[in-house]
């Protein structure tokens, strides 16, 4: 395997939190660190027992969340049937398993078992008991995702961090104006930031067709226009990320740790840009578009289509704010032709929904604000997660600040 085709993996293995030994290094073709399905599949083939990855401990090499040599903490849900693949490794970093105040609940043996038990109980109450083994698909500092087979089709357990909203809040809001546009929530535990979702058929729309763009982008605008009438201010349970609130957040960001990653010239330019934000926000407001409920990560990979119906997924970054945040999101994920189509569809839809507004100008004005908003959000991630998993977002706030400066 080459460095560019996958990753090497070493696992520190426990059962009920008791260290059992290490497995690896071995290789998997999937390059992304949070894609743990091939890791657990390999472990189960070696050990003969169901296994889940709890969290990433370290990475040697790699970048952008992929490649390199990743070391994980994994937990067997039953004692291994076979132990010949286990190595006693006194030099392994067992100290990394010590408790940490910012560790996600699903990144601990007891927390993940409790979440799986919760999902099992809810499914049985719904008359959809699991009919096979659960399959962990992804886990990282922002989410855990588990596929659960049931007689009524797959269900998905998704867990989120304490500093995020429970996705059921945003899903419910979108479902209130366009039910098929949002996934079906089977159960939710807002206090624990976890949801149990019904399966959405189809494929994620990476590289979307012209037809999918032509229907999905205006559909979002229609839903958001309806939600803006129902909710002129931030609904309960949804963070308020409206442009005026961003002004003070950016000033605090530039006085924080991200400043150390900028050159003196970049930091000076960033402070000047921050000083212009009140005027920029006023110009954006003058474009006449209402603040509304945002999906928050409206790129095509979060559109799921079966050629008849498109449904949005992954509402973890939903908030109350300016619709241009979602309008601009497809841009880095599409080619020039498809982005031009998406931007035209967005501006046309809002022009029809809010007569007299200027969505084209709003889309231009919002660009630096959106990048500053992402910088603030990434810093929230870094502030909310334990040090070993900050590598997922290291440098992201500074990169977004630079992107905002490039909009001048």
Image: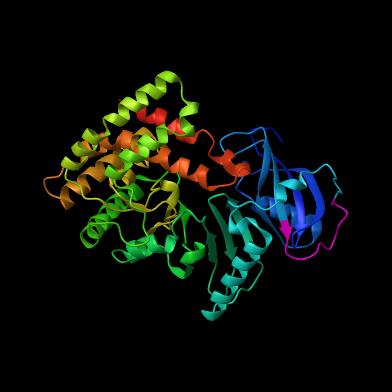
Name the foreground residue: 265 vs 297: 265
Q: Which residue is drawn at 55% across and 67% down?
A: 154
Left or right: residue 37 compared with residue 12: left
Of all residues, the one furthest to the top in this rendering is: 265
**Magenta segment includes 79:** yes
Where is the C terminus found, in terms of image quarters? Answer: top left
Which of the 4 image quarters holds residue 243?
Answer: top left
- The percent coordinates of residue 368 (x first, y second) are 32, 33
- The percent coordinates of residue 113 (x first, y second) are 65, 66
Q: Give the range drawn in magenta.
A: 75-86
Where is the N terminus found, in terms of image quarters? Answer: top right
**Magenta segment includes 68:** no
Q: Residue at x 56, y 36 (%)?
A: 64
- The percent coordinates of residue 56 (x first, y second) are 65, 46
- The percent coordinates of residue 347 (x first, y second) are 22, 43
Left or right: residue 162 compared with residue 45: left
Q: Residue at x 85, y 60 (%)?
A: 82
Q: Which secondary structure is most common in the magenta stretch?
A: loop
């Amino acid at each position: 395997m080459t460095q560019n085709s996958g990753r090497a993996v070493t696992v520190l293995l426990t059962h009920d939190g008791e260290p059992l030994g290490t497995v690896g290094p071995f290789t998997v073709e999937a390059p992304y660190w949070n894609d743990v399905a091939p890791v657990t599949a390999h472990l189960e083939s070696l050990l003969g027992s169901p296994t889940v990855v709890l969290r990433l401990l370290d990475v040697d090499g790699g970048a952008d969340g992929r490649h390199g040599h990743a070391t994980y903490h994994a937990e067997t849900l039953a004692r291994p049937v076979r132990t010949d693949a286990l190595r006693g490794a006194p030099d392994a970093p067992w100290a990394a398993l010590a408790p940490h105040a910012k560790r996600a609940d699903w990144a601990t043996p007891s927390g993940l078992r409790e979440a799986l038990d919760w999902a099992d109980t809810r499914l049985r109450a719904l008359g959809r008991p699991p009919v096979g083994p659960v399959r962990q698909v992804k886990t990282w500092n922002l989410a855990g995702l588990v596929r659960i087979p049931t007689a009524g089709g797959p269900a998905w357990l998704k867990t989120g961090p304490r500093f995020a909203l429970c996705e059921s809040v945003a899903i419910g809001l979108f479902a209130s104006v366009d039910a098929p546009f949002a996934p079906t929530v089977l159960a939710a535990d807002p206090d624990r930031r976890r949801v149990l979702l019904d399966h959405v058929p189809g494929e994620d729309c990476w590289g979307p067709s012209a037809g999918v763009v032509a229907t999905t982008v205006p559909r979002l605008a229609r839903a958001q226009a309806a939600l803006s009438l129902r909710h002129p201010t931030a609904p309960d349970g949804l963070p308020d990320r409206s442009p005026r609130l961003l002004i003070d957040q950016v000033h605090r960001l530039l006085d924080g740790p991200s400043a150390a990653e900028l050159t003196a010239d970049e930091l000076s330019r960033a402070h000047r840009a921050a000083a212009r934000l009140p005027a920029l926000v006023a110009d954006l407001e003058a474009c006449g578009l209402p603040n509304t409920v945002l999906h928050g990560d409206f790129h095509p990979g979060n559109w799921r289509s079966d050629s008849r119906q498109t449904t949005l997924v992954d509402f973890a970054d939903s908030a109350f704010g300016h619709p241009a945040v979602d309008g601009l999101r497809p841009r880095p994920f599409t080619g020039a032709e498809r982005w031009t189509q998406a931007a035209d569809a967005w501006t046309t839809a809002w022009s029809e929904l809010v007569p007299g507004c200027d969505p084209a100008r709003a889309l231009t004005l919002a660009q630096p604000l959106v990048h500053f908003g992402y910088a603030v959000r990434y810093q929230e991630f870094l502030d909310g997660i334990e040090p070993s998993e900050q590598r997922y977002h290291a440098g992201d706030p500074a990169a977004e600040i630079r992107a905002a400066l490039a909009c001048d």
